C-alpha cells in the first residue's frame, strides 16, 4: 500500500466510506477529493480509511488537464458518465421481430438499435447499482448477498452479447468477474 500523506493532485484514491475518488486540491493536513457518489469531501492526509490506487507524488505538479483525465477514467470505470457502446456491424439497420405463437395476432417489430440501446441501459444501471452496493454502509454479508444476485443477473444477460461489437462490452457472469 502506498503512503497517503504525500499525494498530489490527480492521485486516485479509495476511501473506506466514500469509495473511489480523485484528489483535486491539497492542504497541509488534508485533501479535497471528488468522490463519484458523495461529491467533494475533505479527507485527512493520514486517515486510516484512505488507500492510494494511482499515486502522483506531491512534488510533481499535475496539470488541471491530467487531473481531469484521471477523473474521467474513474467515472468511466464506475459508469458515472456514459461511454460509447457500439452495436455489432452485422446488426446495422436490422430489426427485432417478435412473432406470437397465435397467428391471429400481429408480430411486434422494433429497430434492433433501439433494443440494443435498452440492453446497454440495463447493463449501465447494473454497474451503477453494483458500485452503490459496494460503497454502501451495509454489512459485508449483505453486500455479498446482493453481489451474488447482481452476478447472476449479468450471467442471465450473456445471451445478448452477440449484439455487441467489442468483447470488452459483454455481460459476464460468475465465471469471468
Image (cartoon, rainbow, N blue to C red):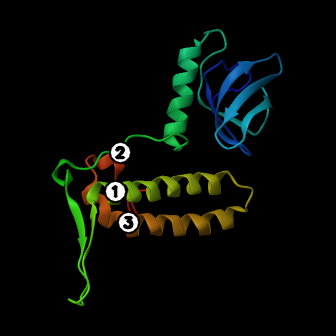
Depth check: give the residue in front, 64 or 151. 64
Residue contact at pointers 2 and 3, CB within 8 angstroms: no
Of circles 1 and 3, the one toward us is 1
Residue 31 percent across, percent down from the top left: 76, 24
Classify the position of the C terminus by image quarter. bottom left
Residue 118 percent across, percent down from the top left: 40, 58
Q: How many marks?
A: 3
Give the residue number, with chain letter if any, for mark 1: 114
- Residue 100 sits in which quadrant? bottom left
Of circles 2 and 3, the one toward us is 2
Of mark 1 and mark 3, the one earlier in the sequence is 1
What element does badge 3 sit on?
A: helix
What element does badge 1 sit on?
A: helix
Residue at screen point 74% across, 46% down: 17
- Residue 94 sits in which quadrant? bottom left
Q: Which mark is residue 35?
A: none
Give the residue number, with chain letter if any, for mark 2: 85
Q: Callout 3: few (<14), some (14-19), or many (20+) C-alpha neighbours within 10 Å?
A: some
Gap in Å between the C-alphas at discs 2 and 3? 16 Å
Residue contact at pointers 1 and 2, CB within 8 angstroms: no
Amino acid at each position: 500500500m502506498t503512503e497517503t500523506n504525500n499525494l498530489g493532485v490527480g492521485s486516485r484514491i479509495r476511501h473506506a466510506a466514500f469509495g473511489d475518488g480523485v484528489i483535486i486540491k491539497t492542504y497541509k493536513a488534508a485533501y479535497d477529493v471528488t468522490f463519484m457518489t458523495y461529491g467533494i469531501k475533505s479527507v485527512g492526509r493520514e486517515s486510516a480509511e484512505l488507500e492510494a490506487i494511482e499515486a502522483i507524488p506531491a512534488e510533481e505538479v499535475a496539470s488541471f488537464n491530467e487531473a481531469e483525465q484521471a477523473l474521467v477514467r474513474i467515472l468511466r470505470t464506475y459508469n458515472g458518465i456514459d461511454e460509447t457502446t457500439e452495436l455489432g456491424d452485422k446488426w446495422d439497420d436490422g430489426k427485432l421481430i417478435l412473432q406470437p405463437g397465435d397467428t391471429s395476432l400481429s408480430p411486434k417489430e422494433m429497430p434492433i438499435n433501439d433494443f440494443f440501446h435498452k440492453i446497454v441501459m440495463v447493463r449501465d444501471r447494473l454497474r451503477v447499482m453494483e458500485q452503490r452496493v459496494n460503497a454502501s454502509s451495509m454489512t459485508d454479508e449483505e453486500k455479498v448477498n446482493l453481489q451474488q444476485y447482481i452476478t447472476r443477473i449479468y450471467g442471465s444477460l450473456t445471451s445478448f452479447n452477440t449484439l455487441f461489437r467489442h468483447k470488452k462490452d459483454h455481460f459476464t457472469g460468475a465465471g469471468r468477474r
